[in-house]
Image: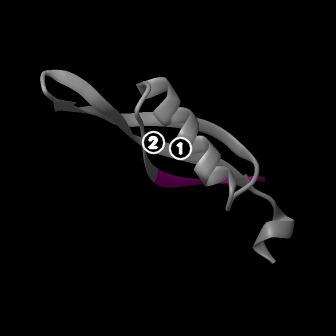
Amino acid sequence: MSIIKVIEVIASSNKSFDDATHNAVAEAAKSVKNIKSVYIENMKAKVENNKISSYAVNAKISFEITNKDIS
């Protein structure tokens, strides 16, 4: 039986929501392995001078923990 854990990561980008999501996964991958999925719980954009200046996501990232990781 495998165990799936979920962490929440907040990430941003000046380009797009898609890029912010990629940044969330890349950042999580620095400290966890076996990432299985990402669920975007919330998205928001910052607006300056009537234009979007940055994009942000709250991402729930799931990853599998093996028996080796638990010991």
Q: Is residue 30 above or below residue 48?
A: below
Amino acid type at image mark 2:
Ala
Residue at the front extreme of this rendering? 49
Task: Please say if the residues under marks 1 and 2 sit with CB atoms less than 8 Å apart.
Answer: yes
Amino acid type at image mark 1:
Ala
2 in the magenta segment: yes
Q: Nearer the viewer, residue 15 or 43?
A: 15
**Residue 45 at what x, y percent from top left?**
26, 31
Q: Residues within 10 Å of mark 1 (few under 14, many from 20)?
A: many
**Residue 7 at what x, y percent from top left?**
51, 55
Q: Which residue is mark 1?
A: 24
Spatial CA distance of label 1 from label 2 is 7 Å
Tell me the tag on residue 59. 2
53 in the magenta segment: no
Instruction: Determine whether the residue tagged by mark 2 lies in a helix, strand or loop.
Output: strand
Residue at the left extreme of this rendering? 50
Specify the quadrant of the image occupied by residue 65.
bottom right
**Residue 48 at what x, y percent from top left?**
16, 31
Query: Which residue: 18% across, 30% down?
Result: 47
Specify the quadrant of the image occupied by residue 61.
top right
Which portion, as a residue range, is magenta? 1-8
